[in-house]
Image (cartoon, rainbow, N blue to C red):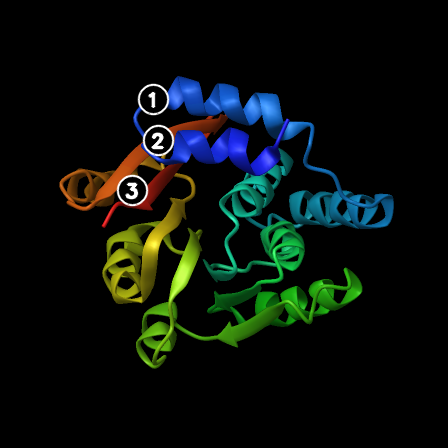
Amino acid sequence: MNLKKSWSNYLNSLKCSSTLIRAFGECESQVSMNSELTDFLKGLKQFGIENDIPNVTERGGRFLNMLVQMTGSKSGLEIGSANGYSTIWLAEAFRNNNGKLKSIDFSQPTHESAKENLNKAGLSDVVEFYFGNALEVIKAWNDQRFDFVFVDGEKRSYWDFWEVIQPFLADRAVIAFDDVLSFPEKTKPFMEKIKNVLGFDQVVLPIDKDDGVLLMTKTN
């Protein structure tokens, strides 16, 4: 099965959540990493659980990795590095695509931890880290275009993040907002507004049993 072709066919029009989840299930086993990096991710995930670090799930990380590879994305943005767990999943895929990733976090300790962990994972050359308020950091950039964006920052700021990233989206860009099902009280205002946005296909994918990702593709 051609990994990129099998999933990208569904991304052309995000209409059916169940179809997309089924496609993910069919292709998930093809997402592979070397055993050393896999073991490092397992240890990092366990550390996050023990220290209450809000990382994505392993399945969520695998989904992000697969999504980047299947879309052929080469210029990525992550809002919310935490300790770098999701960043590693993303960076490994961008390395395979000969691409680069920018990652922003507003917490100094986790920002430093993410940089350290990406270095240990051998992926520091793929990622450019930024410390600070993502809204201010992004506004300061010039001539940037992203074909993939993963948003996992402060949930109540999702609409603000959306507004600031729009000018930086490339044609056919893919955008993923995490935790839209597990934090309904925080993400409801955003979800009510985003559904009326034109020029984007969108669907909520229940990647995990109690959570999901809002996936969007730019159509024009």
Q: Which residue was labeled with disc 3?
A: 187
Residue drawn 64% across and 26% down? 1
* Amino acid marked by disc 1: Cys
* Amino acid marked by disc 2: Val
Distance in Å between CA atoms under marks 3 and 2:
13 Å
Q: Which mark is residue 80?
A: none
Alpha-carbon neighbours of circle 1 within 10 Å: few (<14), some, or many (≥20)?
A: few
Q: Position of residue 164 (x, y in %)?
A: 27, 65
Q: Is residue 216 above or below residue 100?
A: above
Judged by depth in the image, the label closer to the viewer, 1 or 2, is: 1
Q: Which residue was labeled with disc 2?
A: 204
- The first of marks 1 and 2 along the sequence is 1
Residue 59: quarter of image: top right
Residue drawn 77% across and 60% down? 121
Residue drawn 46% across and 69% down? 106
Callout 2: helix, strand or loop? strand
Q: Is residue 123 left or right of residue 6?
A: right
Callout 3: helix, strand or loop? helix
Residue 118: quarter of image: bottom right
